[in-house]
Amino acid sequence: MNWRRLNHALHRDIGFLCIGLTLLYALSGIAVNHMHDWNANYSIERFNLQIDPLPPGVVNSAQVQQVLRQLGESKISKKHFQPDPENLWLYADTRMIRVHLPSGNVQAEKPQRRPFWYRLNFLHLNHAKKAWTWVADIYAGGLFLLAMTGLLLLPKRADLKRRALMLSLAGVVVPVFFLLIYY
Amino acid sequence: MRKSVVLLLMALLLYLATSPVLAKTFGDGITLNKTTLVSELLENGDAYVGKRVQVRGMIADVCESRGCWVYVAGDKPFEKIRVKVKDGEIVFPLEARGVEAVVEGTLEKFDLSREEVIERKRHHAEERGEDFDPASVTSGETFYQIRGLGAEIEGV
């Protein structure tokens, strides 16, 4: 097998091997880049409710129970927090309930993980650590080889060769250009 | 030969599947033996600025969009401390709200002008989809924050 054939075979096989992880990183990359516009990890349902007002100050457990009863909470959590004398935060399952004591206004949030996107981002951002780091490193190595073997796939036709070189150069110039502007 | 490769791949997959992913540990995890009270950090923060500290308490709130900060409830009423991590390096899950945690990091001090406070509060309000009135901020603020490096959170 001459080097051209070997290079082509390597490029093709590494390409196949990288398909799954490339899709994972590409999709998750877009999601993570636009996290401020769309929360890819959670969908959050929000409710506004009204209960009887309570006087500001440190709330006692009886008052917490009273609030929870008014909210119709069956699974009563003992956990609560007051960021200031006027506000009370309650936690029930995964929900967070913010109570403004003097007005009785209640804002409740119920987050739910988006199963597909959460898992994608979990892997992309390497929360798994451990062995997944090796997988990600191997994938990075695969991408490096893909680029190197790709460079050697220069076509024989002169016009295509020029085009291949220009496109490859563009891929290098773009990040350098942005580094010059932003860094 | 082919059987050996398949067996090897299966063994690798089994290892990957069973290797602990440390679901309860975030970042570097916990390295210190001593916990400092949040009230101590808030009252005598200057003595701890630049040092690695460990706090223990309930997670009072979590950044909804990126999981890049949490508030740890203090030991005294109305007290909490913000723990900020580098975006993407540690991502705190929303399910951590109301859960006990041990968090470590380096204490930082911020002296913000009124304009900086407005910008910061506006950003937080945007994150939570709330209205914000700049007129509600009348002066600058000095506060302490932990640059989060590791955490252990129960049951998430």
Image (cartoon, coloured by chain):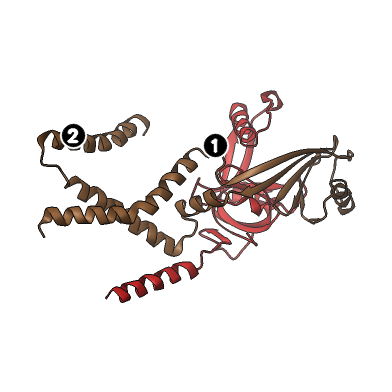
Which chain is displayed in brown in the rendered image? A
Q: Report the number of discs.
A: 2
Q: Chain of mark 1?
A: A
Residue at the top extreme? B135
Q: Which mark is residue A116?
A: none
Would you say B123 lies left or right of A163 here?
Answer: right
Question: Which residue is rendered at x = 72% and y = 47% of the image?
Answer: A96
Label 2: which secondary element: helix
Location of residue B53 by image quarter: bottom right
> From the viewer's perspective, is A54 left or right of B20?
right
The foreground one among A110 and B122 is: A110
Residue A107 appears in view: yes
Return the residue nearer the eye: A51 or A72.
A72
**In the rendered image, what is the letter of the chain coloured red?**
B
Amino acid type of the residue that numbered disc 1 sits on in the rendered structure: His
Instruction: Give coordinates of residue B83: x percent, y percent.
Output: 60, 48
**Dot 1 alpha-carbon crowd within 10 angstroms: few under 14, some 14 to 19, many 20 or more:** some
